[in-house]
Image: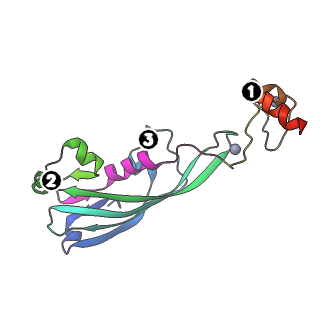
Amino acid sequence: MSVLVIDLDKIKHGSCRQRGDLVPAEIELEGEPRFGFSGPLRLDVRLSTTDHLSFHVAGGLTFTAEGKCRRCLERVTTKVVNELRGMFAFPGALDKLALSEEERREQGIFPLENNAREIDLTAMVRENIILEYPRFFQCDNDCRGLCPKCGKELNTDSCDCREEFIDPRWSKLLDLKNRK
Ligand SMILES: [Zn+2]
Ligand SMILES: [Zn+2]
């Protein structure tokens, strides 16, 4: 069974720990090319309940995101450590909370069917990745990227076209600086 699926019997004494690796395909993000990964994703969460109607999930999701530097297009990997927090609830518990669907979503509460025998973390993990995945990659804070004119990699190479690309609004400032 996938690490994302937890049999409710495992939580019958009030809590359990669920940890293990999963492959990106398990989170069903294939249609989203912006999510690149290097290696498996590591899940480590604790599930707990006091009433056996609602189940709290708290822990982390760790993975290596892989993408291209937004300036020079080099391959870049970044380690990501996300906090994973939410709740699964049977209708009995949801009714007591009396939340709108939007509020439920904002609070990370996932409904369980009355006859559910297991908790499936797939949707929770998918949402976590969609929200917390790096917005962009950059190989280095000082990455100089590619020359917009000739396409040379300016980290390792140089070209003569750079001067022409100074924004006219900055040229006065540069003049002042050069005079000093
Ligand atoms: Zn770069
Ligand atoms: Zn150039």
Question: Of discs 2 and 3, which sits in the foreground?
Answer: 2
Q: Which residue is mark 3?
A: 30
At which x and y percent is residue 113?
A: 15, 51
| Residue 153, image quadrant | top right
**In this picture, which residue range is highlighted in magenta?**
117-138
Q: Quadrant of the N terminus?
A: bottom left
- Image position, residue 19 (x, y; %): 38, 67
Eyeballing the image, is 16 above or below 72?
below
- Mark 1 to mark 2 CA distance (whole Å): 56 Å
- Res 119 quadrant in image: bottom left
Q: Are marks 3 and 1 in contact (CB under 8 Å)?
A: no
Q: Amino acid at mark 3?
A: Glu
Comparing 19 with 56, the one in front is: 56
Name the amino acid, label 1: Asp
Q: Residues within 10 Å of mark 3 (few under 14, many from 20)?
A: few
Amino acid type at circle 2 is Leu
Instruction: Locate residue 46: give its quadrant.
Output: bottom left
Which mark is first along the chain, 3 or 2? 3
Give the image's coloring scheme: rainbow
Query: Looking at this rendering, what residue extends furthest in the bottom direction?
Result: 13
Identify the residue under disc 2.
97
Query: Where residue 137 sits: x, y (%)?
Result: 60, 45
